Image (cartoon, rainbow, N blue to C red):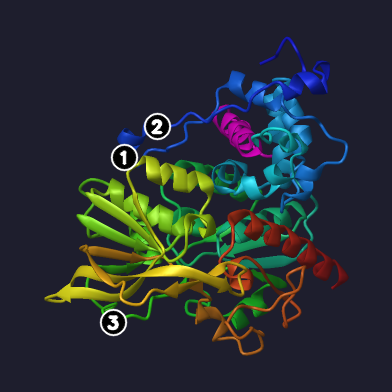
Amino acid sequence: MTTSATSNELTAKERMTIERVKMPEQDAAQRAGNFLEVNLGLSEAAAVREAQRCLQCKNRQCVQGCPVEVDIPEFIDKVAQGDFASAAEILTRTNALPAICGRVCPQEIQCEAKCVRGIKGESVAVGHLERFVADWARQNGIKAETTKVEPSGFKVAVVGAGPAGLTAAGELARMGHEVTIFEALHAPGGVLRYGIPEFRLPENVIDYEVAQIEALGVRIECNVIVGRTITLAEIREKFDAAFIANGAGLPVFLKVPGENLNAVYSANEFLVRVNLMGAYRDGYERTPIIRGRRVVVIGGGNTAMDAVRTSKRLGAEKAMIFYRRTEAEMPARTEEIKHAKEEGIEFHLLEAPVEILGSDGWVSGIRMQKMELGEPDDSGRRRPVPIPGSEHEVECDVIVVAVGINANPLLTATEPELKTNKWGYIEADESGRTSIPCIFAGGDIVRGSATVILAMGDGKDAAAGIDEYLREK
């Protein structure tokens, strides 16, 4: 596609007059009953128009705000000119998973937050454009560059096929190393596949971008649990280096009476059953899921939003979020909160659980207590303080706990030389180096629960660190 007015022909003043495009969406009432993607993507004309809003700053603040340092002005300029193939080539130089990032990254607090265009008006919709370019490339058969490089002779193992592991594997393969990913579950993607619902991140998008990594020569072995199927010591014998990116999937519970009742799920289990194992599909009985009539989700992050919106799609008449602070403190993305409200999700703020109630071993309700905000805690947010005498009961038949995750000790417990902190997370420096010279680590197993793009940034940094280590070796 070409345009009559290229990006270079527009003055800064003309760019400033262009309003930010709106992402087309499924109708809220309709989408609340299906698992089809909510955001529908930009048209070519809308993408070009949005790209023309970019001021093409010499001081590229947006790039500084991107954990994987995508060449944002460059790829956007190509979109503005209608040269989508060149935009895709630029994008995939630095981002191994652009279609995924365009859907789930919190651009509003990263690249878009740094956008100079946003000082007066709204920032450029970098995420929407990233998704557009990646989708266009997929739909038109444009594949990532797979130029063969001279083999280094080194073999690298990657533990975990999530965003950090996939990114590191792709980078290492481009450097000439032989890479094998060991994935515990029966399909690659990690949190991308089991933790993010189909209506936010379709399975076919994950499959395509994983295939691009495999096209670089990366081998992926699923159903391999490092720490059980194979030990880290065995990996060290067979490989020259390893990158641990197995995530932090140990659920945190509420520590209140009644948590052992039937129909109390951790968000991890609930979303794994639905997303990875396909329990949302009609007639799919191999992976049972309790489709509650009244569902309570405890938490205020993106995982909580995913869980409550999923329960609505599974048929809940009342799907409710309970969060102990106010909406201003919610860690969930603004877009996810907006979409949840549009879909009829009930928000109950400044309330915390006291006890889960049951009958004959099954959940029948939950006792909540109203809160007020006190002084700031270690997170910088005001601490929720219980209000005496404010307890009340809420009828429900399914409860999903989405209040965080801890480090999974499966791998680290089998490797005493691997240094961890008091919370069980692996200690690593900025390049991912751990206490074992040939072992690197990144993503949630180092950071705790974080974003997809931060995990990808860790993967890139660790790949550079591993390459340096191997070349020195």
Q: Which residue is mark 1?
A: 34
Q: Quadrant of residue 238?
A: bottom right
Residue stretch in magenta: 126-146
Q: Residue 375 placed where, x, y %?
A: 57, 73
Question: What residue occupies the far left of the structure in this picture?
Answer: 360
Question: Residue 179's x, y, as percent?
Answer: 66, 61
Mark 3 residue type: Pro
Give the amino acid at mark 1: Asn
Mark 2 or 1, which is nearer the eye? Answer: 2
Q: Are marks 1 and 3 in contact (CB under 8 Å)?
A: no
The residue located at (51%, 64%) in the rendering is 183
Q: CA distance from mark 2 to mark 1?
A: 10 Å
Q: Could you tell me what secondary structure mostly forms the magenta stretch?
A: helix
Q: Is residue 27 highlighted in magenta? A: no
Q: CA distance from mark 1 to mark 3?
A: 34 Å
Depth check, mark 2 against mark 3: the one in front is 3
- How packed mark 3 is, by other alpha carbons closer than 10 Å (few <14, some 14-19, many 20 or more), is few
Residue holding disc 3? 257
- Residue nearest the observer in this picture, 449 or 213: 449
Q: Is residue 361 above or below residue 41?
A: below
Picture quarter with the N terminus? top right
Q: Which residue is mark 2?
A: 26
Across and down, in percent, residue 228 comes to 48, 79
Local secondary structure at mark 2: loop
At label 2, the amino acid type is Gln
Q: Earlier in the sequence, mark 2 or mark 1?
A: 2
Which quadrant, please, contains the C terminus?
bottom right
Mark closer to the chain start, 2 or 3: 2
Q: Is residue 412 above or below residue 282?
A: below
Q: Is residue 48 above or below residue 428?
A: above
Q: Secondary structure at mark 3?
A: loop
